Amino acid sequence: MKEGRNTAGALGLVLGHPFDTVKLLGFFKGMSFPLVSIAVVNSVLFGVYSNVLLALTAMSHQERRTQLPSYTHVFIAGCTGGVIQTFFLAPFDLIKVRLQNQTEPRVQPGGPQPRYRGPVHCAATIFREEGPRGLFRGAWALMLRDTPTLGLYFVTYEGFCHQNTPHGQNPSSATVLVAGGFAGIASWVAATPLDVIKSRMQMDGLRRREYQGVLDCVVSSFRQEGLRVFFRGLTINSARGFPVNAVTFLSYEYLLHSWG
Ligand SMILES: CN(C)C(=N)NCCC[C@H](N)C(=O)O
């Protein structure tokens, strides 16, 4: 009896395994694009931040543990990272926003094709229909969003670590996680108003041009929808911001230590 149950269990596993595999593959489908974009953008951001801070303070990462750089230096390094990362982030973010806002149904055999069939097709279509500059639509709003907020991001992170770490020691993993999480929340709270504007600018030009520029978009969004338009997505941005940035900073610290 027991043997029969074991055999049935094993058979069930053998039969179920291909389904689980397909399910898992399906689960992670569509992740390669965000993975590539986050790898490129974060390498640029953290690389620029570390190097600008090194140039401003003439101190290595380890030396900075005993002597905290001024918050002005941290802020400038973060803002510089924000400006430079915009050039890399803009096309990736535009493609993400266009794909997310695509409301056409899934492709049916013989049915109409969606406007964008995937990230590469989306980039090629924008390039063809809107020109090379089209790939940077909304980049000004993105730069306005990211420059001060990335300054704030690194100030929050360094400040929290400094406050919660005994002098001269490295912050614990728990401290790094919480500091990274708070940095994520603080930056997203500050960034949400311009995030709304940035996404609208990126969608503009798809059918007809609605806004003349960032300011026009701010004014007409406010006129049509009131002040609350600038807080759209605040909760979800903050809830996502904590875990994402906790893990981001933990990996950053881990890489800095393993590279010496
Ligand atoms: C616009 N904001 C808020 C920022 N750039 N904040 C820094 C965190 C960015 C991180 N890749 C994230 O997606 O949360």
Image (spheres, rainbow, N blue to C red):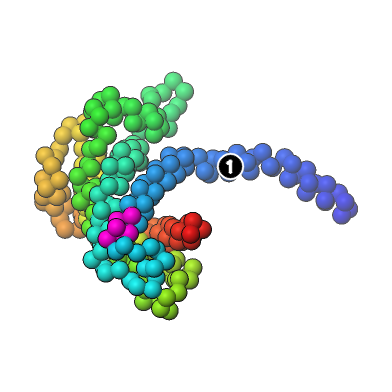
Residue 76, given in percent of the width and then of the height, sits at 24, 59
The spot of residue 20 in percent (x, y) is 63, 43
Is residue 137 among the parts visible in the rendering?
A: yes
Task: Using the image, determine if residue 96 lies above or below residue 83.
Answer: above
Looking at the image, residue 258 lies above or below residue 131: below
Residue 254 % position (x, y): 49, 60
Residue 57 as seen in the image, left or right of residue 218: right
* Some atom of ligand 1 lies within 8 Å of the CB belonging to the residue at label 1: no
Outermost residue toward the top? Answer: 110
Q: Main secondary structure of the magenta part?
A: helix
The residue that appears at 45% across and 44% down in the rendered structure is: 35
Residue in the foreground of this view, choosing between 149 and 20: 149
**Horizontal side of residue 6 vs 119, given as left or right:** right
Q: Would residue 244 be counted in the magenta stretch?
A: no
Q: Identify the magenta region.
A: 51-56
Element assignment for label 1: helix
On the image, numbered disc 1 is attached to which residue?
23
Which residue is the extreme one toward the front? 58
Q: Residue at x 40, y 59 (%)?
A: 245
Q: Residue at x 25, y 56 (%)?
A: 79
**Count of marks placed on residues:** 1
Residue 63, quarter of picture: bottom left
Q: Nearer the viewer, residue 43 or 197?
A: 43
In the rendered image, residue 88, in percent from the top left (x then y), is placed at: 32, 42
Q: Is residue 36 above or below residue 42?
A: above
Task: Classify mark 1: residues with Cα within 10 Å, few (<14), some (14-19) or many (20+).
Answer: few
Tell which residue pokes out farthest to the bottom in this image. Answer: 166
Residue type, mark 1 in image: Lys
Task: Classify residue 56 by image quadrant.
Answer: bottom left
